[in-house]
Amino acid sequence: MLYAKTTPEQKRIRFREGLASGRIQQFPGAFNPLSARLIEDKGFDGVYISGAVLANDLGLPDIGLTTLTEVATRAAQISRMTDLPAIVDADTGFGEPMNVARTIQELENAGLAGCHIEDQFNPKRCGHLDGKNIVDLETATKRIRAAADARRDPNFLIMARTDIRGTDSLEAAQDRAKALVDAGADAIFPEAMKDLSEFQAIRDAVDVPILANMTEFGKSALFSTDELTSVGVNMVIYPVTLLRSAMGAAERTLDTIKADGSQQGAVESMQTRARLYELVDYEAYNHFDTSVFNFQVPGTR
């Protein structure tokens, strides 16, 4: 009940062990704390917290409008609800190298297991859109070096995301990945790879874990874990999948109410009251106060 039983330090060790296990790690994207609980309940390896989802949840586009405070606060709310390690999208680090350093320490304080920092200009844009602007190599490596120098827990994972494949050659992406590892990156997130051979090329270029972003409606096909494992990918994220699913269901339910004058036609596809109470661990609160859970949940008998 309340929050996770596992400390942030334990989660970071677990994350490192998972990446070194030889088994691809699956991190669905949580759009709120309750969905993080669901991800854990379904047996996944960890929770991803997408910058796009955080921005969209505020009704904003993913162009770097969110602040460090907003991201760290929401990421803390999500990560503390699960015993799984959680990593967060830190965009471009929220400023110059000194700001990047502060970002890392705030995310450590928020209980995250790691984050990724990208090499776009601010204002940035979704990695699977055209027209991106990429910073020069010196700026990109300064961000990662500042991040690595600022962390206090050596198990907090610093991942470098590079979007350079969207503006340059695959060879340029390989060179950028190598330079980011030399600057202190523990892992590489090569954004918008066009096919499996491009993931393989990044795998051949660096000896740190690499991440695949399996986002819908993007530049990359939705490869399976077996396919990604075959080219040496260590971790896969599904950043906006749950938000898109939830919003799609919400839209269909609203259409039903509008058309029928009642939600009755959509009830069968809803999460039940009993399942919701199970996820929030309602019954466990009875340990502290017997008046909290002293009723029969409708629909369980």
Image: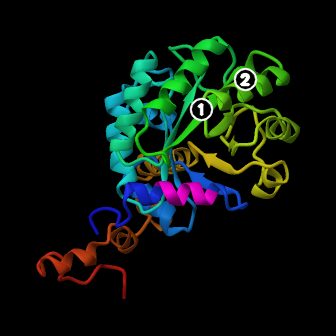
Residue 195: quadrant of the picture:
top right
* Residue at the limit of the structure toward the bottom, as seen here: 301
Q: Image quadrant of residue 19?
A: bottom right
Judged from the image, the secondary structure of the residue bearing numbered disc 2 is: helix
Question: Label 2: few (<14), some or many (≥20) within 10 Å?
Answer: many
Real-space Cα separation, disc 1 to disc 2, in angstroms: 13 Å
Give the colour scheme shown: rainbow
* Residue 77, percent from left and from top: 33, 48
What residue does disc 2 label? 176
Give the magenta part as a residue range: 12-18
Side of 193 relative to 75 (left or right): right
**Where residue 31 sits: x, y (%)?**
45, 46
Amino acid type for the residue under numbered disc 1: Gly
Q: Quadrant of the C terminus?
A: bottom left
The residue lying at 78 percent from left, 41 percent from top is 221
**Which callout, 1 or 2, points at the residue further toward the start of the chain?**
2
Which residue is drawn at the image coordinates 88% and 38% (left, top)?
197
Q: Is residue 17 above or below residue 31?
A: below
Query: Residue at (61%, 34%) from the top-left corner?
Result: 185
Q: Which disc number belongs to residue 184?
A: 1
Q: How many marks?
A: 2
Q: Main secondary structure of the magenta part?
A: helix
Rate crowding at label 1 as few (under 14), some (14 to 19) or many (20 or more) other CA atoms within 10 Å. Answer: many
Return the residue nearer the eye: 178 or 110.
178
